[in-house]
Amino acid sequence: MQINILFETSSSGDYVGVLKNSDLVNGKIASQDAGSSNIGIYYQVGGGGVNGLFADALNGAKHVNAGPLCISVNAALHHAYDNQFGNGAWSQDSSSGRGDRLTSFYIPLPANAHTTSHTVGDQIAGIVYSVGPQVPGPKVSDPDQYRQIYLDAFAGVAAANQNGSIEAIRLCVLSTGIYGPPDPADKQPMVRDAARIILEALTASAKLPSAAQLPTTMLINCSSKSGYERDAFTHAAGALGISVTSDGFTLDSAT
C-alpha cells in the first residue's frame, strides 16, 4: 500500500486553518487535534495551542464561549472516553487529570458543521482527538506509547471510513508545540524523532486488515516561518531512503 505524504501550507506560507478545506485533495478530511490531559480540558477541546485553534474553529470565532458545535464534540469525547475506559471514567479522571491514558478518538462532525460554524470547511468530516505525552525533549521519551497514539488515530479513522469518503488525514506532530522543548536547538531533534515514529505507525497501519479503509493521503500542516514539520518529515523519509520533493513523498508500506 502506498500513502502520499503531502506538505500543506496556506497561500501566505503559514499553517492551514485546522478545520479549513485543503487545496491538495478533493474528498473529505479528518483533522488531527493535539488534545489535552490537563485538568479543566481533560479530553476536551479548548485551552491554548492547537487545541485552542480547534475550539476557535468550532465556535466560529476567537475567544468566545463554547458554541453548540464545540459542546457536541466535547460531549462525544466524554462518551468515547467512557466507552474505552469504563462508565464514569471521564468524570473521575477529568477531576484530577492523568497521563497514563493517552490515546486517540475519531469524532465525526455533523453534515451541517460548515454552516453551523463558518470556520469549518465542508470538506471536514471529523476530528481526530489525540492526547500526547508532555515531554521536555529533545527526544520522544516513550516511542512505543507515542506510536500507539497514532496507531489508535489511524484505526479510528479507518473504522469510520467504511464508505471511503475520507480521502486524507491532516496530521499534527503531538507533544512538540507548547509542551515541547522551548529551545529551538532541542525542538528540531524532537520533531524529527516524532516524525520518524509517525511514519512507523503509518507503515504498520497500512499492513493491518483495516488498511483498505485507511485514507491514502496524509497532509502535513507546515509553515515556511518555522519549517519544523517539513524538515522533520523530510529527514525521516530520507532515513528510509525515500526521495522527497517540495510537494512531499510517497511512503510504501513495504518500506
Image: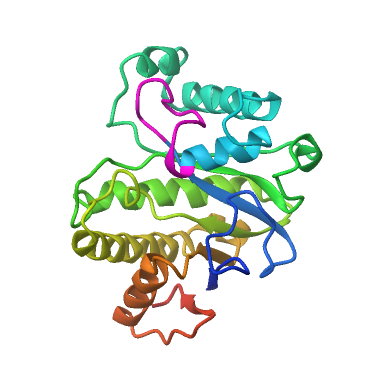
Label count reads: 0
Q: Residue at x 48, y 39 (%)?
A: 51
Between 224 and 3, the residue placed more toward the observer is 224
One can see residue 63 in this view: yes
Q: Give the residues drawn in magenta, as a range.
A: 36-50
Between 84 and 120, the residue placed more toward the observer is 120
- In-image side of 161 versus 208 (left or right): right
Q: Residue at x 73, y 54 (%)?
A: 123
- Give the vertical position of 88 relative to 126 (above or below): above
Please identify the quarter of the rendering in which residue 100 is found: top left
Between 172 and 240, the residue placed more toward the observer is 172
Residue 55 magenta-highlighted: no
Residue 121 point in image, percent of width and height: 73, 50
Q: Residue at x 50, y 52 (%)?
A: 154
Per the picture, the main secondary structure of the magenta-coloured stretch is loop
- Give the vertical position of 75 relative to 207 (above or below): above
- Give the vertical position of 151 relative to 57 (above or below): below
Residue 65 point in image, percent of width and height: 61, 23
